[in-house]
Structure formats: C-alpha cells, structure tokens
Amino acid sequence: MARHKLTLKHKRLVAAGAAVAAVAGGLGVAANAGASETVAQKPSVARVVVKTVFAPADIADVAPAVTYNTELVPVAGRVQVKEELRRDGGTRIELRLRDLAANRTYGAHVHTKPCGRLPADAGPHYQDELDPKRPSVDPKYANPENEVWLDVNTNDDGSARSIAVVDWRFREGGARSVVLHEAATSTHEGHAGTAGARLACVNVAFK
C-alpha cells in the first residue's frame, strides 16, 4: 500500500509496531569515547526514558520518532533518550543510537516543540536563558551550558552514545524533542549552535 494511502488505523499500527520492536530488540549501543561524564557522579532519579525506532515522516502524527533523511537516518534505526533529574538540581540527558550511517558525526540538540512532518516543526533549541534575538547564533546563549548538545560519532555499526549534563532543569512543557543534524555543532560567532540540516527527530516529554 502506498504511504500516502495509509489509513489512520494503519498508521497507528505501524508506529506501535515500531516502538514494540525497538523495546523488544533493545538498543545495545556501544559508547563513544566522548560520551563519558566529566563531572563527579551525583545520585539522580530517572524520570523519562524513550526507546523507539525512526519511522517515515509522513506518519509523524502517530510515530514517536521520524526521519527526514533515510540515507543518514534509516527507517527502523533505533534511538533511546533518557532524562535524569539530579539531586543537585541539574539534569542529565543520554542519547543512544543504533543502525545509523557508520563512522560519521551527527549534531544533536533538545528542541522546544514536538516532531512533525517537516523538519522545522520541532522549533528552536531549548535554552535555559533565552536569547532575545532569533535565530540564536550568539555563543553567549547558543552553547552547551545554556542548551543541551548531544553530538555523537557513530562507530562501524552505526551505533553511538552521548551524554549531556546541565546545572538546570527544563521549564514545564518547554522541551519536547531531540533533533539529529547532519554535522557537528558550530561554536563560533554568528553560527553558534548550528549543525546543518535536520535529519531526524524523536519526541521526548522532558520534565
């Protein structure tokens, strides 16, 4: 059946089946060398875990995660996002990926809106302190202390893992997705926070 002729019932079955397959198969993702935490471990409480697979963007209304570029983020590639609220008032976010393109860098950030059929639907990066200018490309605001950056480098199997720890918590309802980009995140003036085209998106109801 052609994708554009899928009924809502069929779409829901596809999305539900994809999520079940991801949970049943497990991610088993190997860690990047850069995924280790550089801060002292603190006790934390897990609050949100999303484990699913990427689905075609045309079923974004029912799919927990979607891909906009099936060459770099294949349909059925696996993704897991875990949020932990640390007892010191900070937040730890972990991203795991599997079955993506091998040996390449992906930019990744927490965004303000849920995923949609179009890459731009996820809105801008979440910022703890909001930049009054949009788009935000000032390194004073677009940086890994004020945003959540989760850039990854996949291995030979297309697997990767990254961790970000920030000393703040999300505003209620303010962070709703993680978006994968085609390149590493820039840090220089006028381009800070940019990482090229949006390749894929996973819905996460951050606390």
Image (tube, rainbow, N blue to C red):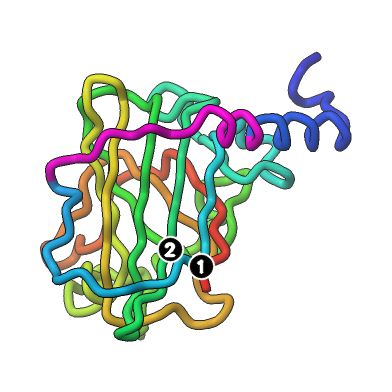
Q: Residue at x 25, y 43 (%)?
A: 152
**Pointer 2: residues within 10 angstroms few (<14), some, or many (20+)?**
many
Task: Name which residue type carries label 2.
Answer: Glu
Distance of label 2 from label 1 (alpha carbons):
6 Å
Asked which quadrant contains residue 38, the reply is bottom left
From the image, tell me which residue sits under label 2: 83
131 in magenta: no
From the image, tell me which residue sits under label 1: 47
Q: Nearer the viewer, residue 171 or 135?
A: 171
Query: Horizontal and vertical percent for residue 185?
Result: 22, 53
Q: Which mark is residue 169?
A: none
Compared across the picture, whether 126 is left or right of 88 comes to right
Query: Horizontal and vertical percent for residue 182?
Result: 31, 39
Magenta span covers which residues?
A: 19-33
Compared across the picture, whether 7 is left or right of 147 comes to right
Label 1: element kind: strand
Q: Residue furthest top?
A: 1
Q: Residue at x 49, y 82 (%)?
A: 171
